[in-house]
C-alpha cells in the first residue's frame, strides 16, 4: 500500500525567546535570545562562550591565592563538565545529520 501523505521532514528544535542580564530583576533585560534560532547555531555560540569562560577562569586559577584558589579550581572543574556535555550534544547532532 502506498503512502498518500509523506512524513514531515525532521526539523531540528529551535529556541524560544529568553531575556537575560537583568541583574536579578533589578532592571529590564539588557540581552535576549531570539526565538527560532536553530539548536546547531545555539550550540556553536554556547561553545564559544564556554571556551571564553574556561580561559578566563583558568587565568584566575593561576593568579589566585588560597582559599580563593580552591573556589576557582572548583569552577574550572564544573566548566570542564559543561564542556564535556556540550561536546556530547554536538557529537549527537553530527551523528543525526549523517543518518538523516
Image: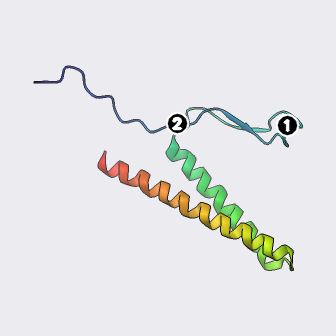
The residue located at (51%, 60%) in the rendering is: 87
The residue located at (70%, 69%) in the rendering is: 76
The residue located at (48%, 59%) in the rendering is: 88
Displayed quadrant of residue 52: bottom right
Q: Is residue 44 left or right of residue 66?
A: left
The tag on residue 77 is none
Colour scheme of the rendered structure: rainbow
Could you say which is closer to the camera, residue 99 or residue 82? Answer: 82
Q: Position of residue 28 (x, y in %)?
A: 84, 33
The residue located at (31%, 44%) in the rendering is: 100
Q: Give the residue at the far left of this rendering.
A: 1
Displayed quadrant of residue 63: bottom right
Vertical position of residue 87 compared to residue 39: above or below = below
Instruction: Name the residue beneath numbered marker 1.
Output: 25
Q: Earlier in the sequence, mark 1 or mark 2?
A: 2
Q: Is residue 10 left or right of residue 71?
A: left
Could you say which is closer to the camera, residue 8 or residue 41? Answer: 8
Give the spatial CA distance, label 1 vs label 2. 26 Å
Instruction: Name the residue beneath numbered marker 2.
Output: 14
Q: Is residue 59 left or right of residue 17?
A: right
How busy is the neighbourhood of tag 2: few (under 14 within 10 Å), some, or many (20 plus)?
A: some
Could you say which is closer to the camera, residue 98 or residue 26? Answer: 26
Q: Position of residue 11 (x, y in %)?
A: 41, 35
Give the quadrant of the N terminus.
Answer: top left
How busy is the neighbourhood of tag 1: few (under 14 within 10 Å), some, or many (20 plus)?
A: few
Q: Is residue 60 visible?
A: no
CB under 8 Å between discs 1 and 2 = no
Q: What element does badge 2 sit on?
A: loop
Q: Is residue 50 visible?
A: yes
Q: Position of residue 80 (x, y in %)?
A: 62, 67
Q: Of tags 1 and 2, which is closer to the observer?
A: 1
Q: What element does badge 1 sit on?
A: loop
Amino acid at each position: 500500500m502506498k503512502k498518500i501523505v509523506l512524513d514531515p521532514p525532521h526539523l531540528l528544535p529551535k529556541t524560544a525567546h529568553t531575556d537575560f542580564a537583568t541583574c536579578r530583576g533589578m532592571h529590564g533585560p539588557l540581552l535576549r535570545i531570539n526565538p527560532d534560532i536553530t539548536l546547531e547555531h545555539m550550540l556553536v555560540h554556547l561553545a564559544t562562550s564556554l571556551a571564553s569562560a574556561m580561559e578566563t577562569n583558568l587565568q584566575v586559577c593561576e593568579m589566585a591565592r588560597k582559599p580563593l584558589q580552591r573556589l576557582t579550581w572548583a569552577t574550572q572543574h564544573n566548566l570542564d563538565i559543561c564542556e564535556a556535555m556540550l561536546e556530547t550534544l554536538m557529537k549527537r547532532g553530527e551523528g543525526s545529520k549523517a543518518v538523516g
